[in-house]
């Protein structure tokens, strides 16, 4: 009777643990990430310019599936005008997310103003921690190197023929494999 009770209790704990793990995988946390930064600058030709971008201290490598793409949120404007026109509003940050400038012409029908804005912060899924020493985070722009595969946002080294893989950078083998002549099998 005691064994049956212990077995039932163990089964309940395992089921609850599996349900919690499933909930964490299915309900991955979506978070707001990024800080808008606006900077005026002068280009090499002496033209006034301004840029705004969505930045993250880790360059968004701790996140995946960002909407909108944070790298598409980088905008810049440099002053340019028709020869008989004059700049009436120099290139500047209107706020941390918006940049603009404008010019006026003798014929006011040719007056122009330019405004660019970004969306920041962006909404991303928090990346799971990579589990093996030879794994590392997938870089959003480049993906994984050729001998690695993308598994839920982590680059995992592909197993070589014969069921072996190279040891991790620190010489360790992934769980379930053992050192064998410089390889992990």
Image (spheres, rainbow, N blue to C red):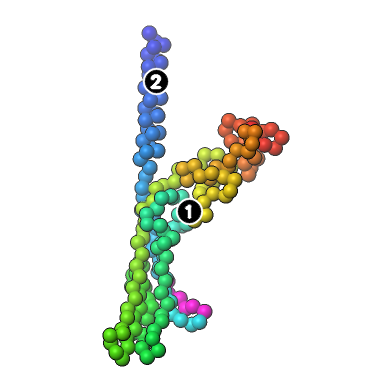
List x then y, in percent, for residue 16. Answer: 37, 27
- Mark 1 and mark 2 lie on one chain; the one further toward the N terminus is 2
Q: Is residue 128 visible?
A: yes
Q: Is residue 133 visible?
A: no
Q: Is residue 84 above or below residue 146?
A: below
Decide whether residue 68 is among the magenta residues: no
List x then y, in percent, for residue 98. Answer: 34, 69
Q: Is residue 49 above or below residue 88?
A: above
List x then y, in percent, for residue 67. Answer: 37, 54
Nearest to viewer (mark 1 / mark 2): 1
Give neighbour class at mark 1: few <14, some 14-19, many 20+ (Cα, 10 Å).
some
Q: Is residue 52 above or below residue 90?
A: above
Q: Secondary structure at mark 2?
A: helix
Q: Residue at x 46, y 81 (%)?
A: 47
Query: Farthest residue in the top direction?
Result: 1
Q: Residue at x 37, y 22 (%)?
A: 12
Q: Residue at x 45, y 76 (%)?
A: 41
Q: Which residues are magenta?
A: 39-44
Q: Which residue is mark 1?
A: 140
Q: Which residue is mark 2?
A: 11
Give neighbour class at mark 2: few <14, some 14-19, many 20+ (Cα, 10 Å).
few
Q: How many marks?
A: 2
Q: Which image quadrant is residue 51 in?
A: bottom left
Q: Secondary structure at mark 1?
A: loop
- Separation of marks 1 and 2 at Cα, in angstroms: 40 Å
Task: Pick the quarter of the image with the C terminus.
Answer: top right
Q: Residue at x 63, y 44 (%)?
A: 169
SS assignment for the magenta stretch, majority? strand
Decide if residue 183 is on the left or right side of residue 127.
right
Q: Which image quadrant is residue 49 in?
A: bottom left
The one of 66 and 56 positioned closer to us in this rendering: 66
The one of 10 and 18 positioned closer to us in this rendering: 18
């Amino acid at each position: 009777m005691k064994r049956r009770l212990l077995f039932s209790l163990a089964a309940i704990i395992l089921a609850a643990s599996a349900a919690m793990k499933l909930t964490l995988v299915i309900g991955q946390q979506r978070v707001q990430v990024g800080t808008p930064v606006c900077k005026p600058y002068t280009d090499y030709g002496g033209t006034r310019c301004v840029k705004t971008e969505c930045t993250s201290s880790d360059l968004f490598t701790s996140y995946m599936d960002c909407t909108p793409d944070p790298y598409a949120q980088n905008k810049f404007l440099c002053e340019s005008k028709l020869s008989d026109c004059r700049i009436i509003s120099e290139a500047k940050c209107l706020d941390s997310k918006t940049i603009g400038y404008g010019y006026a012409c003798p014929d006011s029908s040719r007056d122009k103003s330019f405004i660019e804005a970004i969306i920041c912060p962006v909404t991303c899924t928090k990346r799971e921690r990579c589990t093996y020493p030879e794994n590392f985070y997938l870089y959003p722009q480049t993906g994984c190197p050729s001998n690695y595969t993308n598994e839920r946002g982590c680059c995992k080294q592909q197993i070589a023929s014969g069921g072996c893989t190279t040891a991790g950078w620190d010489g360790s083998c992934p769980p379930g494999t053992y050192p064998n002549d410089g390889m992990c099998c």
